Amino acid sequence: MVSVIPQPLQVEPGTGHVPVATLEVHALGLEPTAPWLADLAARLLSSVDGVAATHDDPASEDAPSGATALVLRLDAHAGPVGSTSPERYSLVVDDGGVTATAAEPVGLLHAVQTLRQLVEAPRSGDDPARVSHVVVHDAPRYPWRGLSVDVARTFFGLDALRAVIDVAAAYKLNVLHLHLTDDQGWRIESPSRPELAKLSSGSDTSGGKGGHLSLADFRALQDHAAERFVRVVPEIDVPGHINAATHVYGDLMPDGVATDAYSGIEVGFSRLTLDLPATEPFLRDVFTDLAHATDGEHVHLGGDEVLKMEPAEYARFVELCERLILEAGKKPVAWQEAAKAPLRPGTIVQYWDTHPMDLTYLVDAAKAGARIILSPANRVYLDMKYTADFGLGQEWAGLVEVRDSYDWEPEEVVPGLPVDTIEGVEAAVWTERIPTRDALFTMLLPRLSAVAEVGWSAPERKDWDDYRRRVAREAHAWRRAGIAFHESAQVDW
Ligand code: ACM
Protein backbone atom coordinates (compact mmCIF):
# COMPACT_ATOMS: atom_id res chain seq x y z
CA MET A 1 0.00 0.00 0.00
CA VAL A 2 1.09 3.57 -0.54
CA SER A 3 2.11 5.58 2.48
CA VAL A 4 -0.57 8.22 2.94
CA ILE A 5 -2.44 9.33 6.08
CA PRO A 6 -5.41 9.29 6.01
CA GLN A 7 -5.63 6.20 3.84
CA PRO A 8 -7.21 7.16 0.49
CA LEU A 9 -10.32 5.42 -0.77
CA GLN A 10 -9.01 4.03 -4.05
CA VAL A 11 -5.36 3.54 -5.00
CA GLU A 12 -4.12 1.80 -8.16
CA PRO A 13 -0.32 1.55 -8.18
CA GLY A 14 1.50 1.60 -11.54
CA THR A 15 4.98 0.40 -12.45
CA GLY A 16 7.19 3.40 -13.32
CA HIS A 17 8.03 6.56 -11.48
CA VAL A 18 8.60 10.25 -12.12
CA PRO A 19 11.42 12.38 -10.70
CA VAL A 20 10.23 15.28 -8.54
CA ALA A 21 13.52 16.96 -7.58
CA THR A 22 12.15 19.92 -9.48
CA LEU A 23 8.40 20.31 -9.78
CA GLU A 24 6.56 23.05 -11.56
CA VAL A 25 2.99 23.69 -10.48
CA HIS A 26 0.56 24.78 -13.18
CA ALA A 27 -2.80 25.88 -11.80
CA LEU A 28 -5.46 25.95 -14.49
CA GLY A 29 -8.54 28.08 -13.89
CA LEU A 30 -7.80 28.70 -10.22
CA GLU A 31 -7.05 32.40 -10.38
CA PRO A 32 -10.59 33.57 -9.66
CA THR A 33 -11.44 31.02 -6.96
CA ALA A 34 -8.22 30.16 -5.15
CA PRO A 35 -5.42 32.39 -6.42
CA TRP A 36 -3.11 31.39 -3.55
CA LEU A 37 -3.33 27.67 -4.12
CA ALA A 38 -0.51 27.15 -6.60
CA ASP A 39 1.89 29.03 -4.38
CA LEU A 40 0.78 27.10 -1.28
CA ALA A 41 1.15 23.83 -3.20
CA ALA A 42 4.69 24.76 -4.20
CA ARG A 43 5.59 25.66 -0.62
CA LEU A 44 4.13 22.45 0.81
CA LEU A 45 5.93 20.30 -1.72
CA SER A 46 9.19 22.18 -1.24
CA SER A 47 9.07 21.20 2.44
CA VAL A 48 9.72 17.60 1.37
CA ASP A 49 13.30 16.32 1.45
CA GLY A 50 14.85 16.56 -2.02
CA VAL A 51 12.00 18.48 -3.70
CA ALA A 52 12.13 22.03 -5.06
CA ALA A 53 8.75 23.16 -6.36
CA THR A 54 7.86 26.42 -8.04
CA HIS A 55 4.68 27.62 -9.61
CA ASP A 56 4.65 29.01 -13.06
CA ASP A 57 4.78 32.71 -13.05
CA PRO A 58 3.63 33.99 -16.44
CA ALA A 59 6.10 36.85 -16.08
CA SER A 60 9.03 34.49 -15.62
CA GLU A 61 11.07 33.51 -18.69
CA ASP A 62 13.02 30.73 -17.06
CA ALA A 63 10.93 27.74 -16.16
CA PRO A 64 13.24 25.17 -14.60
CA SER A 65 14.37 22.87 -17.38
CA GLY A 66 13.71 19.21 -16.77
CA ALA A 67 11.09 19.99 -14.15
CA THR A 68 8.17 17.59 -13.77
CA ALA A 69 4.82 19.29 -14.22
CA LEU A 70 2.16 19.20 -11.52
CA VAL A 71 -1.13 20.29 -13.05
CA LEU A 72 -3.93 21.43 -10.71
CA ARG A 73 -7.29 21.59 -12.45
CA LEU A 74 -10.95 21.75 -11.45
CA ASP A 75 -13.11 18.99 -12.88
CA ALA A 76 -16.59 18.05 -11.67
CA HIS A 77 -15.92 14.42 -12.64
CA ALA A 78 -12.91 14.08 -10.37
CA GLY A 79 -12.88 11.69 -7.44
CA PRO A 80 -14.35 8.25 -6.86
CA VAL A 81 -17.24 7.34 -9.13
CA GLY A 82 -20.50 8.31 -7.44
CA SER A 83 -18.94 10.55 -4.77
CA THR A 84 -20.67 13.88 -4.32
CA SER A 85 -18.35 15.15 -1.61
CA PRO A 86 -17.14 18.69 -2.37
CA GLU A 87 -13.74 17.49 -1.10
CA ARG A 88 -13.29 14.67 -3.61
CA TYR A 89 -10.19 14.58 -5.78
CA SER A 90 -8.13 12.44 -8.11
CA LEU A 91 -4.36 12.30 -8.46
CA VAL A 92 -2.65 10.69 -11.44
CA VAL A 93 1.11 10.15 -11.57
CA ASP A 94 2.35 8.76 -14.90
CA ASP A 95 4.97 9.39 -17.56
CA GLY A 96 3.28 12.69 -18.37
CA GLY A 97 3.89 14.02 -14.86
CA VAL A 98 1.43 14.62 -12.07
CA THR A 99 -2.18 15.74 -12.52
CA ALA A 100 -4.52 16.62 -9.69
CA THR A 101 -8.19 17.18 -10.43
CA ALA A 102 -10.95 18.05 -8.01
CA ALA A 103 -14.49 19.31 -7.98
CA GLU A 104 -13.51 22.26 -5.77
CA PRO A 105 -10.21 23.91 -4.83
CA VAL A 106 -10.26 22.14 -1.43
CA GLY A 107 -9.85 18.82 -3.21
CA LEU A 108 -6.79 20.11 -5.02
CA LEU A 109 -5.16 20.92 -1.70
CA HIS A 110 -6.03 17.42 -0.47
CA ALA A 111 -4.40 16.03 -3.61
CA VAL A 112 -1.26 18.03 -2.89
CA GLN A 113 -1.19 16.75 0.71
CA THR A 114 -1.44 13.22 -0.68
CA LEU A 115 1.32 13.87 -3.23
CA ARG A 116 3.56 15.31 -0.51
CA GLN A 117 3.39 11.99 1.33
CA LEU A 118 3.97 9.93 -1.81
CA VAL A 119 7.42 11.40 -2.44
CA GLU A 120 10.15 8.81 -2.01
CA ALA A 121 13.29 10.44 -0.66
CA PRO A 122 16.54 10.26 -2.63
CA ARG A 123 18.22 6.91 -1.91
CA SER A 124 21.73 8.19 -2.60
CA GLY A 125 23.31 11.51 -3.41
CA ASP A 126 22.71 11.19 -7.16
CA ASP A 127 19.19 9.80 -7.06
CA PRO A 128 16.40 12.35 -7.39
CA ALA A 129 13.38 12.29 -5.13
CA ARG A 130 10.64 10.49 -7.03
CA VAL A 131 7.00 9.45 -6.99
CA SER A 132 5.84 6.05 -8.19
CA HIS A 133 3.14 5.91 -10.83
CA VAL A 134 -0.26 5.75 -9.19
CA VAL A 135 -3.90 6.66 -9.67
CA VAL A 136 -5.75 7.85 -6.54
CA HIS A 137 -9.47 8.58 -6.31
CA ASP A 138 -10.35 9.84 -2.89
CA ALA A 139 -13.14 11.39 -0.81
CA PRO A 140 -13.84 11.67 2.93
CA ARG A 141 -16.13 9.49 4.99
CA TYR A 142 -17.44 12.42 7.09
CA PRO A 143 -17.83 16.11 6.25
CA TRP A 144 -16.74 17.30 9.74
CA ARG A 145 -13.23 16.29 10.78
CA GLY A 146 -12.11 18.58 13.54
CA LEU A 147 -9.74 19.43 16.31
CA SER A 148 -10.79 21.43 19.35
CA VAL A 149 -8.06 23.42 21.09
CA ASP A 150 -8.52 24.87 24.57
CA VAL A 151 -6.80 28.25 24.57
CA ALA A 152 -8.53 29.24 27.81
CA ARG A 153 -6.62 27.09 30.32
CA THR A 154 -3.28 27.74 28.63
CA PHE A 155 -3.24 30.48 26.06
CA PHE A 156 -1.77 29.62 22.66
CA GLY A 157 -1.52 32.57 20.30
CA LEU A 158 -1.59 33.18 16.61
CA ASP A 159 1.73 31.54 15.68
CA ALA A 160 1.04 28.31 17.55
CA LEU A 161 -2.51 28.14 16.21
CA ARG A 162 -1.31 28.67 12.65
CA ALA A 163 1.06 25.75 13.12
CA VAL A 164 -1.82 23.66 14.50
CA ILE A 165 -3.86 24.48 11.40
CA ASP A 166 -0.98 23.42 9.15
CA VAL A 167 -0.70 20.07 10.87
CA ALA A 168 -4.47 19.54 10.83
CA ALA A 169 -4.68 20.37 7.13
CA ALA A 170 -1.78 18.01 6.40
CA TYR A 171 -4.07 15.16 7.46
CA LYS A 172 -7.14 16.63 5.72
CA LEU A 173 -8.89 17.82 8.87
CA ASN A 174 -11.21 20.71 8.09
CA VAL A 175 -12.42 22.21 11.39
CA LEU A 176 -10.49 24.09 14.07
CA HIS A 177 -12.77 24.50 17.09
CA LEU A 178 -11.42 27.06 19.56
CA HIS A 179 -12.46 26.83 23.20
CA LEU A 180 -12.03 30.55 23.80
CA THR A 181 -13.45 31.05 27.28
CA ASP A 182 -13.44 29.17 30.56
CA ASP A 183 -13.05 29.81 34.28
CA GLN A 184 -9.39 30.65 33.80
CA GLY A 185 -9.54 33.15 30.95
CA TRP A 186 -11.47 35.08 28.31
CA ARG A 187 -9.28 34.73 25.22
CA ILE A 188 -11.12 36.69 22.54
CA GLU A 189 -11.71 40.40 22.16
CA SER A 190 -15.42 41.10 22.57
CA PRO A 191 -15.87 44.66 21.25
CA SER A 192 -19.04 45.45 23.17
CA ARG A 193 -17.48 44.02 26.35
CA PRO A 194 -13.82 45.06 26.18
CA GLU A 195 -13.39 44.52 29.95
CA LEU A 196 -13.59 40.74 29.49
CA ALA A 197 -10.29 40.27 27.71
CA LYS A 198 -8.72 43.20 29.53
CA LEU A 199 -9.45 41.92 33.04
CA SER A 200 -9.71 38.18 32.51
CA SER A 201 -6.87 37.09 30.27
CA GLY A 202 -3.77 37.84 32.31
CA SER A 203 -3.05 34.38 33.72
CA ASP A 204 -3.46 30.68 32.97
CA THR A 205 -3.19 27.27 34.63
CA SER A 206 0.46 26.98 33.65
CA GLY A 207 1.47 30.00 35.72
CA GLY A 208 2.04 31.88 32.47
CA LYS A 209 0.93 35.38 31.62
CA GLY A 210 -2.04 34.27 29.55
CA GLY A 211 -3.14 36.45 26.68
CA HIS A 212 -6.01 36.72 24.25
CA LEU A 213 -6.73 36.96 20.54
CA SER A 214 -7.53 40.45 19.34
CA LEU A 215 -10.07 40.68 16.55
CA ALA A 216 -7.15 41.34 14.21
CA ASP A 217 -5.53 38.10 15.40
CA PHE A 218 -8.78 36.24 14.92
CA ARG A 219 -9.07 37.71 11.41
CA ALA A 220 -5.51 36.62 10.57
CA LEU A 221 -6.14 33.16 11.99
CA GLN A 222 -9.29 32.68 9.94
CA ASP A 223 -7.47 33.87 6.80
CA HIS A 224 -4.71 31.33 7.39
CA ALA A 225 -7.30 28.64 8.01
CA ALA A 226 -9.36 29.58 4.94
CA GLU A 227 -6.34 29.21 2.65
CA ARG A 228 -6.10 25.63 3.93
CA PHE A 229 -9.88 25.12 3.72
CA VAL A 230 -10.15 24.80 7.50
CA ARG A 231 -13.23 26.34 9.13
CA VAL A 232 -12.82 27.98 12.51
CA VAL A 233 -15.64 27.21 14.98
CA PRO A 234 -15.29 29.51 18.01
CA GLU A 235 -16.77 28.60 21.39
CA ILE A 236 -17.93 30.73 24.28
CA ASP A 237 -18.71 28.21 27.02
CA VAL A 238 -21.90 28.98 29.02
CA PRO A 239 -23.68 28.76 31.42
CA GLY A 240 -20.93 27.00 33.41
CA HIS A 241 -17.16 27.36 32.94
CA ILE A 242 -17.80 31.08 33.27
CA ASN A 243 -15.65 32.44 36.07
CA ALA A 244 -13.70 34.63 33.64
CA ALA A 245 -16.91 36.61 33.11
CA THR A 246 -18.22 36.60 36.68
CA HIS A 247 -14.79 37.88 37.69
CA VAL A 248 -15.39 40.95 35.53
CA TYR A 249 -19.11 41.61 36.10
CA GLY A 250 -20.47 41.41 39.64
CA ASP A 251 -23.97 41.87 38.25
CA LEU A 252 -23.75 38.34 36.78
CA MET A 253 -23.70 37.07 40.40
CA PRO A 254 -26.79 36.86 42.65
CA ASP A 255 -24.94 38.70 45.43
CA GLY A 256 -23.63 41.33 43.03
CA VAL A 257 -20.02 40.61 43.96
CA ALA A 258 -17.49 39.78 41.25
CA THR A 259 -15.68 36.49 41.80
CA ASP A 260 -11.92 36.11 42.24
CA ALA A 261 -9.73 35.28 39.26
CA TYR A 262 -9.10 31.54 38.98
CA SER A 263 -6.09 29.65 37.69
CA GLY A 264 -6.73 26.20 39.16
CA ILE A 265 -8.05 23.18 37.31
CA GLU A 266 -11.33 22.32 39.02
CA VAL A 267 -14.48 22.28 36.88
CA GLY A 268 -18.17 22.78 37.56
CA PHE A 269 -18.07 25.47 40.27
CA SER A 270 -19.05 28.55 38.27
CA ARG A 271 -22.37 29.40 36.65
CA LEU A 272 -24.57 32.13 35.30
CA THR A 273 -28.06 32.81 36.67
CA LEU A 274 -30.68 33.27 34.01
CA ASP A 275 -33.10 35.48 35.88
CA LEU A 276 -30.62 38.21 36.75
CA PRO A 277 -31.21 41.33 34.62
CA ALA A 278 -27.59 41.41 33.43
CA THR A 279 -27.48 37.85 32.11
CA GLU A 280 -29.34 38.00 28.80
CA PRO A 281 -27.70 41.29 27.68
CA PHE A 282 -24.30 39.74 28.46
CA LEU A 283 -25.05 36.64 26.41
CA ARG A 284 -26.48 38.66 23.56
CA ASP A 285 -23.41 40.90 23.44
CA VAL A 286 -20.78 38.20 23.53
CA PHE A 287 -22.46 35.80 21.11
CA THR A 288 -23.35 38.58 18.68
CA ASP A 289 -19.80 39.94 18.77
CA LEU A 290 -18.39 36.49 18.18
CA ALA A 291 -20.82 35.69 15.38
CA HIS A 292 -19.94 38.93 13.62
CA ALA A 293 -16.23 38.15 13.84
CA THR A 294 -16.67 34.61 12.50
CA ASP A 295 -16.47 33.68 8.81
CA GLY A 296 -17.80 30.15 9.20
CA GLU A 297 -21.37 29.06 9.69
CA HIS A 298 -21.06 27.78 13.25
CA VAL A 299 -20.70 29.18 16.77
CA HIS A 300 -20.33 26.82 19.77
CA LEU A 301 -22.17 27.66 22.98
CA GLY A 302 -20.49 25.12 25.25
CA GLY A 303 -23.09 23.86 27.71
CA ASP A 304 -20.92 21.20 29.37
CA GLU A 305 -20.49 20.31 33.02
CA VAL A 306 -23.04 22.67 34.52
CA LEU A 307 -23.05 20.88 37.82
CA LYS A 308 -24.94 23.42 39.91
CA MET A 309 -28.16 24.16 38.04
CA GLU A 310 -31.66 22.72 37.89
CA PRO A 311 -32.54 21.11 34.54
CA ALA A 312 -35.32 23.62 33.83
CA GLU A 313 -33.01 26.63 34.12
CA TYR A 314 -30.34 24.84 32.09
CA ALA A 315 -32.85 24.10 29.31
CA ARG A 316 -33.86 27.78 29.19
CA PHE A 317 -30.19 28.74 28.86
CA VAL A 318 -29.69 26.39 25.95
CA GLU A 319 -32.85 27.68 24.25
CA LEU A 320 -31.74 31.29 24.72
CA CYS A 321 -28.19 30.75 23.44
CA GLU A 322 -29.39 28.79 20.42
CA ARG A 323 -31.74 31.67 19.63
CA LEU A 324 -29.07 34.35 20.07
CA ILE A 325 -26.67 32.49 17.77
CA LEU A 326 -29.36 31.97 15.14
CA GLU A 327 -30.40 35.63 15.36
CA ALA A 328 -26.76 36.56 14.78
CA GLY A 329 -26.83 34.47 11.59
CA LYS A 330 -24.93 31.37 12.70
CA LYS A 331 -25.76 27.76 13.46
CA PRO A 332 -25.34 26.55 17.04
CA VAL A 333 -23.06 23.76 18.21
CA ALA A 334 -23.10 22.52 21.83
CA TRP A 335 -21.56 19.84 24.01
CA GLN A 336 -23.54 16.67 24.62
CA GLU A 337 -25.34 17.84 27.80
CA ALA A 338 -27.31 20.35 25.71
CA ALA A 339 -29.22 17.43 24.17
CA LYS A 340 -31.05 17.12 27.49
CA ALA A 341 -32.81 20.36 26.55
CA PRO A 342 -35.25 20.57 23.63
CA LEU A 343 -33.06 21.56 20.66
CA ARG A 344 -33.92 23.14 17.37
CA PRO A 345 -33.46 20.79 14.40
CA GLY A 346 -30.03 21.18 12.84
CA THR A 347 -28.20 22.10 16.03
CA ILE A 348 -24.95 20.15 16.22
CA VAL A 349 -24.30 18.21 19.41
CA GLN A 350 -20.82 17.09 20.36
CA TYR A 351 -20.60 13.79 22.28
CA TRP A 352 -17.62 13.67 24.62
CA ASP A 353 -18.32 12.10 28.01
CA THR A 354 -17.86 8.35 27.86
CA HIS A 355 -19.04 7.82 31.46
CA PRO A 356 -22.87 8.06 31.26
CA MET A 357 -24.44 4.65 30.75
CA ASP A 358 -27.73 6.04 29.51
CA LEU A 359 -27.43 8.08 26.34
CA THR A 360 -31.11 7.85 25.42
CA TYR A 361 -31.39 11.65 25.51
CA LEU A 362 -28.65 11.97 22.89
CA VAL A 363 -30.18 9.33 20.62
CA ASP A 364 -33.58 10.99 20.98
CA ALA A 365 -32.11 14.40 20.12
CA ALA A 366 -30.51 12.93 17.00
CA LYS A 367 -33.79 11.33 15.97
CA ALA A 368 -35.44 14.74 16.45
CA GLY A 369 -33.01 16.43 14.05
CA ALA A 370 -29.75 17.14 15.88
CA ARG A 371 -26.51 16.37 14.04
CA ILE A 372 -23.87 14.53 16.06
CA ILE A 373 -20.12 15.03 16.26
CA LEU A 374 -18.22 12.26 18.03
CA SER A 375 -15.44 13.22 20.43
CA PRO A 376 -15.31 10.21 22.77
CA ALA A 377 -12.86 11.28 25.50
CA ASN A 378 -11.32 7.82 25.88
CA ARG A 379 -10.33 7.89 22.17
CA VAL A 380 -9.81 11.43 20.99
CA TYR A 381 -9.15 13.63 24.03
CA LEU A 382 -5.55 14.19 23.15
CA ASP A 383 -4.75 15.70 26.51
CA MET A 384 -5.09 12.26 28.07
CA LYS A 385 -1.71 10.74 28.95
CA TYR A 386 -0.36 8.12 26.54
CA THR A 387 0.93 6.00 29.41
CA ALA A 388 0.58 6.15 33.18
CA ASP A 389 4.01 7.71 33.65
CA PHE A 390 3.63 10.30 30.87
CA GLY A 391 4.65 13.75 32.11
CA LEU A 392 1.95 15.80 30.40
CA GLY A 393 -1.81 15.75 30.43
CA GLN A 394 -4.48 14.12 32.56
CA GLU A 395 -6.06 10.67 32.83
CA TRP A 396 -9.64 11.06 34.02
CA ALA A 397 -10.91 9.48 30.79
CA GLY A 398 -8.23 6.78 30.84
CA LEU A 399 -4.89 6.43 29.13
CA VAL A 400 -5.08 7.08 25.39
CA GLU A 401 -2.30 5.42 23.42
CA VAL A 402 -1.98 5.89 19.66
CA ARG A 403 -3.86 2.69 18.97
CA ASP A 404 -6.77 3.83 21.16
CA SER A 405 -7.12 6.94 18.99
CA TYR A 406 -6.90 4.80 15.84
CA ASP A 407 -8.90 1.65 16.54
CA TRP A 408 -12.47 2.79 17.03
CA GLU A 409 -15.57 2.86 14.90
CA PRO A 410 -17.71 6.01 15.02
CA GLU A 411 -20.92 4.10 14.35
CA GLU A 412 -20.40 1.99 17.48
CA VAL A 413 -19.71 4.76 19.97
CA VAL A 414 -23.29 5.65 20.96
CA PRO A 415 -25.56 2.58 21.01
CA GLY A 416 -28.74 3.16 19.03
CA LEU A 417 -27.57 6.37 17.37
CA PRO A 418 -28.88 6.53 13.78
CA VAL A 419 -25.69 6.46 11.73
CA ASP A 420 -26.94 9.01 9.24
CA THR A 421 -27.05 11.62 12.03
CA ILE A 422 -23.25 11.47 12.44
CA GLU A 423 -21.74 14.64 11.03
CA GLY A 424 -18.19 13.64 11.85
CA VAL A 425 -15.47 13.28 14.43
CA GLU A 426 -13.47 15.80 16.38
CA ALA A 427 -10.37 15.40 18.53
CA ALA A 428 -9.92 17.75 21.47
CA VAL A 429 -6.95 18.95 23.45
CA TRP A 430 -7.60 20.55 26.83
CA THR A 431 -4.67 22.44 28.18
CA GLU A 432 -4.73 22.36 31.99
CA ARG A 433 -1.54 20.30 31.98
CA ILE A 434 -0.04 21.37 28.66
CA PRO A 435 2.13 24.39 29.34
CA THR A 436 4.10 24.92 26.13
CA ARG A 437 3.81 24.72 22.37
CA ASP A 438 6.10 21.68 22.24
CA ALA A 439 3.96 20.01 24.89
CA LEU A 440 0.88 20.77 22.80
CA PHE A 441 2.32 19.13 19.69
CA THR A 442 3.64 16.20 21.71
CA MET A 443 0.07 15.49 22.74
CA LEU A 444 -1.32 16.05 19.23
CA LEU A 445 1.15 13.94 17.32
CA PRO A 446 0.96 11.21 16.33
CA ARG A 447 -2.60 10.77 17.68
CA LEU A 448 -4.17 13.52 15.61
CA SER A 449 -3.19 11.69 12.43
CA ALA A 450 -4.91 8.57 13.79
CA VAL A 451 -8.13 10.48 14.42
CA ALA A 452 -7.86 12.01 10.95
CA GLU A 453 -7.90 8.52 9.46
CA VAL A 454 -10.98 7.60 11.52
CA GLY A 455 -12.79 10.63 10.13
CA TRP A 456 -11.64 10.38 6.52
CA SER A 457 -10.97 6.78 5.56
CA ALA A 458 -13.51 4.10 4.74
CA PRO A 459 -13.61 1.56 7.60
CA GLU A 460 -12.49 -1.27 5.32
CA ARG A 461 -9.41 0.76 4.35
CA LYS A 462 -8.20 1.07 7.94
CA ASP A 463 -5.45 -1.23 9.15
CA TRP A 464 -3.51 -0.60 12.38
CA ASP A 465 -0.34 -2.40 11.29
CA ASP A 466 -0.22 -0.51 8.05
CA TYR A 467 -0.95 2.79 9.84
CA ARG A 468 2.00 2.09 12.18
CA ARG A 469 4.26 1.86 9.15
CA ARG A 470 2.84 4.99 7.55
CA VAL A 471 2.99 7.12 10.69
CA ALA A 472 6.63 6.22 11.25
CA ARG A 473 7.31 7.61 7.79
CA GLU A 474 5.47 10.84 8.59
CA ALA A 475 7.82 11.40 11.51
CA HIS A 476 10.47 12.48 8.98
CA ALA A 477 8.29 15.41 7.99
CA TRP A 478 7.73 16.37 11.65
CA ARG A 479 11.43 16.20 12.42
CA ARG A 480 12.26 18.23 9.34
CA ALA A 481 9.72 20.89 10.33
CA GLY A 482 10.91 20.91 13.95
CA ILE A 483 7.50 19.78 15.22
CA ALA A 484 7.48 17.94 18.55
CA PHE A 485 5.77 14.55 18.69
CA HIS A 486 5.64 11.57 21.04
CA GLU A 487 7.68 8.53 20.04
CA SER A 488 5.07 6.11 21.29
CA ALA A 489 6.35 2.61 21.98
CA GLN A 490 3.52 1.32 19.78
CA VAL A 491 5.32 2.50 16.63
CA ASP A 492 8.75 1.53 15.24
CA TRP A 493 10.12 4.98 14.62
C1 ACM B 1 -15.71 18.69 28.20
O1 ACM B 1 -14.74 17.93 28.14
N1 ACM B 1 -16.08 19.19 29.35
C2 ACM B 1 -16.46 19.05 27.03
Image: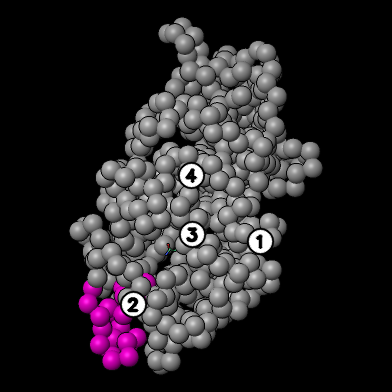
Residue that numbered label 2 is attached to:
270
Report which quarter residue 453 is drawn in. top right
Q: Where's the C terminus, which quadrant?
A: top left
Q: Could you tell me the amino acid type at mark 2?
A: Ser
* Coloring scheme used: one colour
Front residue of 426/358: it is 358
Label 3 close to label 1 by CB (< 8 Å): no
Q: Amino acid at mark 1?
A: Gly
Secondary element type, mark 2: loop
Is tag 3's residue or tag 4's residue first in the polypeptide sequence?
3
For image coordinates 52% across by 53% down, the residue present is 426
- What whole-number distance in Å separates the C-alpha atoms at marks 4 and 1? 22 Å
Q: Which residue is mark 4?
A: 405
Q: Tell me if mark 2 has few (under 14), some (14-19) or many (20+) residues whose alpha carbon lies within 10 angstroms of its own.
A: many
Q: Which residue is mark 1?
A: 416
Asked whether the residues under the numbered discs 4 and 1 touch, taking CB atoms below 8 Å apart as contact, a structural biologist would say no
Residue at x 25% of width, y 60% of height = 205
Within the image, what quadrant is residue 248 found in?
bottom left
* Residue 143 lies in the magenta stretch: no
Crowd rating for badge 4 (residues with CA inside 10 Å; few <14, some 14–19, many 20+): many
**Majority secondary structure of magenta residues:** loop
